[in-house]
Amino acid sequence: MNLENPKMSEENSIVTEQFEDAQQQAEASHLGIWTFIATEILFFGGLFLTYTVYRHFYFNAFVAASKHTDVMFGTINSVILLTSSFTMALAVHAAKENRVKKIAPFLALTILLGLAFLVVKGFEYHKDLHDHLLPGANFDPSLPPQAQIFFWLYWAMTGLHGIHVTVGIGILTVMFASARRGKFSGSYYTPIELTGLYWHFVDIIWLFLYPLLYLVQRHT
Amino acid sequence: MNESEKNYLSAGDTVKSWLLTTDHKRIGILFLFAILFFFSVAAVAAAMMRLELLTPQGDLVLSETYNKLFTMHGVLMVWFFLIPSIPSVLGNFVIPLMIGARDVAFPKLNLLSWYLFIIGGAFVMHAIIIGGVDTGWTFYAPYSTAYSNTHVIEMAAGIFIAGFGSILTGLNFIVTIHKLRAPGMTWFRMPIFLWSMYSTSIILVLATPVLAITLALMALERFWGIGIFDPKLGGDPVLFQHLFWFYSHPAVYIMILPGMGVVSEVVTCFSRKKLFGYYFVAFSSVAIAIIGFLVWGHHMFVSSQSIYAGIVFSFLSFLVAVPSAIKVFNWTMTMYRGSISFEAPMLYALSFIALFVIGGLTGLMLATLAVDVHVHGTYFIVAHFHYIMVGGMVTAFMGGLHYWWPKITGRMYPEKLAQLAALILFGGFNLTFFPQFILGYLGMPRRVHDYAPEFQIYNVLSTVGASILAIGYLLPLIYFLWSLFYGKKAGANPWRATGLEWKTSSPPPKHNFEETPVVTEGAYNYPPLNELGESENV
């Protein structure tokens, strides 16, 4: 705890009453978001575990099923999301360097890329439906029954991930509005950093989903 | 400071000042009201079950209704009473006080936790009112996903939402304990209550999300009509059990670790002694939290789990008894040659130790593969976990509530009456649940509303015990209410206890301390025996 650093007057509006100073507040916020990410990892963990178990049980069905996912859409989306993580990092960097005017544009780019991801995903879902890849009565009869488990997980995992992307876009929009109002500077940008950590986390989840869902033995 | 006259209760008395408060103390009180409501509803369900079991025939309720009653009892007691009991009520109230902070790290999130809890509770109550759920609190697939004709999805949604409230509470406590400790409050000067709340929070943050996703998958499968636990597709229902117990076994420790924290505070205070083996007690909390994650398989000894996995889980379950036993030995050693007095909190702490030992030892019996196969699915299980959950956690909650009641309200409860209530609870509890060990050993299955006539005598004993238990719960409710108006003023430190929460006035001011305290000594620095009797400013 930093005792020599009492509340700085210019930051009085930012440091809330339970904290001694801005540094303590920033440290607490960071620990908070990392704890939240730990929770999120366990949240997705249930799905990843289920995937692992069934892929072990029904490897051939999973290979057959994953060949029906659209690797083109998946790859484009991977590129989009990785690029959005890059623009997000640039926004955080701009804030850190006190180039205040750059923050909002980079956030806007990140939002647009996030939206692009969702649009591409929408087209992909449409195609999947058309190809009878939704488990249930209309499921593609040429696939083994266990392939339905694969696609059940496909919809559940990409759906949950999509919800996280949507929430992320919402948070980014709030940050964008705050940045436009000049709320952030080189001495105060914790919310942008935290948003960035969340956004990178969502990105990393996708980096696991991509090979698991699209690339199962794609080389054969 | 003009605030010095005002405490957190008098800082505002409109409904809005309560419902939009970010004061951790007021949020603790909000939680107290909420869990009392859920406890009462769940207790009514228990009372109806005990009444039904007075006779061997199913004459009060249908078997279907009985299924709904024990589901309702389990769901409400586990997620809407036990899990939030000590953490969200007492933890919320005293953690910032104990570490010398003005509030928790994220006060708004703290309020959000309460709203999530209430919204989740509303879903569950609605599901109960429109017809209930008959799956048991464990929601095993494929019954829950394919066969039950009750409101499974809505109840699961309620638990899901409330679960995120728990996660946020855990997150808040972890950050608060890490970052908001007063100057000089090092990790090893912290009272043990904080260590146990910290360990509890780790479980809340790491286990609850797994429950959330598991319930979501179960509900989705039910909604979709097809899914990953469905054997028709090659799905494995036992996978549901693995996922469920990966949360729900650690959740058992969410329901006992905070109680152990309360007992550590109370035993030292009413023995006027330093805690024996502070480091062991502190680290045993963390050890329980960690090992607790590795024992879930002992719920599946007879569910087609491999025998080798069973052996490993059996061994790990024995292992978790070690840190638990360390605590019991240390509390006992703390009392040894202490100057013990038997105020109500101490009576509850002693009850806790006795009942927890019985619950813990029968837990070892259940961790033994061969014994478990014999008593699996019988009343032995019911008796065992009620000894831990009720005999342990509820008793500790009552002890903690009495201990901190003067701090929370500024008033003393009537001591004699409280001691009587503690004894009634102890007696009533044992009469309710000890016969259930015998019933289980003799082979009476749990979750049935009729039974063979030879079991009747034990069931009658149990029902009589439950009636006594009810008096033991009603009595405190009455005298606590009475004390709000007529109890004598408590003063800052009625127990002459150590700990920062006793250094501020009762009830504490809105921001807890007039100025941030500085800590210069370890916890439980009680004066030696011969200095007793003299009132002093600890």
Image (spheres, grey):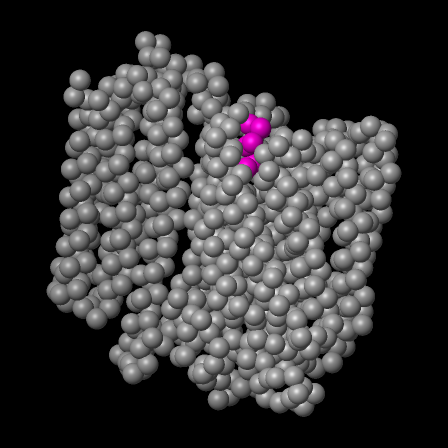
Is A109 placed left or right of B448 in the picture?
left
Residue B109 is covered by the magenta coloring: no
Give residue B369's position: percent from left, percent from top.
59, 34
- Is A71 left, or right, of B381 in this rendering? left
Q: Residue at x 43, y 76 (%)?
A: B185
In this rendering, does residue B385 appear at all? no
Residue A76 in the image: x percent, y percent?
16, 32
Q: Nearer the viewer, residue A212 or B104?
A: A212
Residue A15 appears in the rendering? yes
Residue B134: name its quadrant.
top right
* Quarter the C terminus of chain B occupies: bottom right
Depicted A52 relative to depicted B95: above or below: above
Q: Residue at x 39, y 31 (%)?
A: A50
Q: Position of residue A209 (x, y in %)?
A: 27, 34
Residue B298 x/y as whole percent: 55, 37
Query: At x 34% / y 56%, what residue is drawn?
Result: A33
Please state the extent of the stretch shown in magenta in the rendering. B298-303
The number of numbered discs placed on residues in the rendered structure image is 0
Q: Is residue A62 above or below residue B524?
A: above
Residue at (77, 37) in percent of width and height: B439
Prevalent SS, magenta region: loop
Query: Where, by quadrant of the figure, is residue A133 drawn?
Result: top left
Asked whether B300 falls inside the magenta stretch, the response is: yes
Residue A69 lies in quadrant? top left
